[in-house]
Amino acid sequence: GPVLAALPSPLGSEGGGEGETSTISRIWRVMVERVTQAWTTIPHFYLLREVNATRLVAWREDAQRRMIGKITYTDLLVKLTAVALHQHPRLNAAWQHNTIVLNPDINIGLAMAVEDGLIVPVIHLADQLNLSQLAARRAEMMTKAQANKLSLDDISGGTFTLSNLGMYGVDAFNAIINPPQAALLAVSRIADRVVALNGQPVV
């Protein structure tokens, strides 16, 4: 396809020999190591559900009218996830030393793509922040991630990860758990669907 055609050939000009190598950044190296560890050591299974996002859209529009800073769907999802983790603490747990460790804090990591790879800055104590504070923290993390200025504290202590690819037009994807966490929420785009309501098709 067009994506494969755009990739450089791993072979030399004669179709054989050694492929070219490139310098791998520290972020790429850590990312590859952690993803490999997660995929090979954590038994993954996926649950997929489509939901009606009408109320989510309305909530964002209402919140944006009332607040100064930009409110994104990710901000709302962090808030909702924090509430859900309060109700289901085992999803906020970790498997360590052959036992389940329940984390006392709810620290939600946000998977973000940067030029050098994937980074997961953490919103600490997300359940204790209001929507405006969550939005400000998310914006701060994005700015620091893009400028490669995240501190060790910014990327440490996560107890659950949220990966939102809706802004890229993705309909569905399977994410990989961030060890030693127990689960991850992968969210795709909001789009119109024709569904059955009381036996009739509606948008």
Image (cartoon, rainbow, N blue to C red):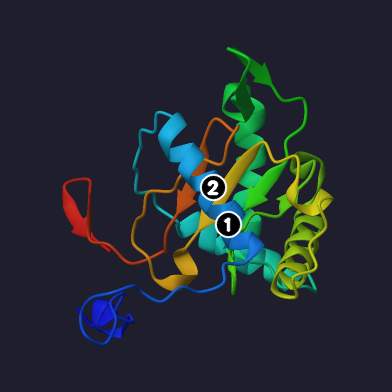
Q: Which residue is mark 2?
A: 33
Q: Find residue 39 and name its label.
A: none
Front in this rendered view, residue 161 or 84? 161
Q: Quadrant of residue 62?
A: bottom right
Give x and y (percent) for residue 127.
Answer: 75, 40
For image coordinates 26% across by 87% down, the residue present is 13
Give x and y (percent) for residue 66.
Answer: 76, 68
Q: Is residue 35 above or below residue 29?
A: above
For image coordinates 79% across by 50% down, the residue present is 130
Give x and y (percent) for residue 104.
Answer: 77, 25
Q: Could you classify mark 1 by the number of other residues whose Cα lies within 10 Å: few (under 14), some (14-19), or many (20 or more)?
A: few
Could you tell me the amino acid type at mark 1? Arg
For image coordinates 81% across by 52% down, the residue present is 152
User: Please, which residue is most extreme toward the bottom here?
Assistant: 13
Front in this rendered view, residue 148 or 189? 148
**What secondary structure is found at the residue carrying circle 2?**
helix
Q: Which residue is mark 1?
A: 29
Q: Are marks 1 and 2 in contact (CB under 8 Å)?
A: yes
Residue 160 visible in the displayed image: yes
Measured Cα–Cα span from mark 1 to mark 2: 6 Å
Front in this rendered view, residue 78 or 61? 78
Q: In the figure, is residue 103 to the left or right of 72? A: right
Q: In the figure, is residue 50 to the left or right of 123? A: left
**What secondary structure is found at the residue carrying circle 1?**
helix
